[in-house]
Amino acid sequence: MKYLSTLLTAVLMLSGTMAAAEEPPIVEIYGEKVYVRDLPLPPKMVATSKSTMSSKEFAQWKQDALRQTLAYEVMDDARKRFLKEMKMEPTQQDIDGYIAFLHRARQADRKQRAEAREKLQQELQQPGLDEETRAAAKKKLSVLDEMDKYDAPPATAEARKEQQESEQTVAAMTVSGWKFNQALYRKYGGRVVFQQAGLEPIDAHKAFMQELETSGAYKILDPAYQDLFKETNEYFDKKFQYADQAAIDKYFDSPWWLHAAENGPKNP
């Protein structure tokens, strides 16, 4: 019996070794090998893509999806390490400050909707109002009602907990993104561009990506993933509108959400 148990263990170990041998690593990130099995794709997305594409199209889609997932993993790890190296990691105080901004913005939106509703109701009470204007006012009121429903406070303790967790996640991502850009600009400087999400130190970002590659932070082991940062490199080649130094200094001096109240609760 002991012999059979030992034999079974040996077979299982051999099977695991063979499976690993069949699937070579595709990239090495900071010395850690990564395999395709480490890059799971959303099952629903895979099923939908497979059912709507030809075999060739699906294979290409899957390859691109895996490459983009891998690129995200590399950058996510690199960002965290860089923020730690620069001693600029987000703190809970940073995150709480952004959540407070979100609450101020939400309150301001509620106030604006209330004022708009009152104005529309007064308009509807005017005598001799033509039907077209009346219908337009009622439609606007309906939109405001839907927005109020969407913005209504959670009704249960579980829903409130979910909302708080969601706020923490969004705030952590936003704060981390801003601090990463701030850290990039502090280290590398260069030109900064206007983007919808705020200012971005484009030259610093390029320098950071080049340093990642030359430092050996990641090594491509599978030629299929050679063009790992394809979309990022294409993005760098776009034409941009560059910010002036005054705007840059103000933006990276302190988090924009802390002084947003000065110009209204919005991302500059």
Image (tube, rainbow, N blue to C red):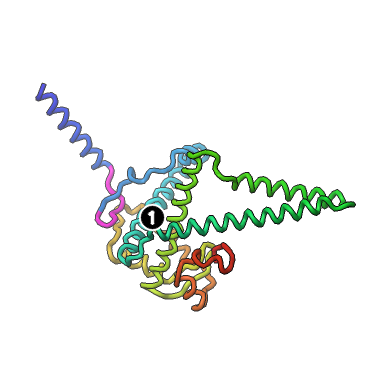
Number of residue marks:
1
Magenta-drawn segment:
23-31
Q: Is residue 46 above or below residue 130?
A: above
Considering depth in this image, is 45 or 108 the residue closer to the camera? 108
Q: Nearer the viewer, residue 99 or 191?
A: 99
Residue 227 in view, yes or no? no
Question: In the rendered view, would you say 106 is above or below 241?
Answer: above
Quickly name the residue at label 1.
Answer: 71
Nearest the eye: 205 or 181:
181
Q: Residue at x 49, y 65 (%)?
A: 258
Q: Which residue is the extreme one toward the right? A: 128
Q: Do we see residue 86 in this rendering?
A: yes
Rendered residue at 41%/71% (across/down): 185
Q: Position of residue 29 (x, y in %)?
A: 29, 55
Q: Residue at x 49, y 46 (%)?
A: 163
Whole-percent x, y for residue 128 in the image: 90, 52
- What SS does tag 1 mark? helix
Relative vertical location of residue 49 with respect to residue 262 in this rendering, above or below: above
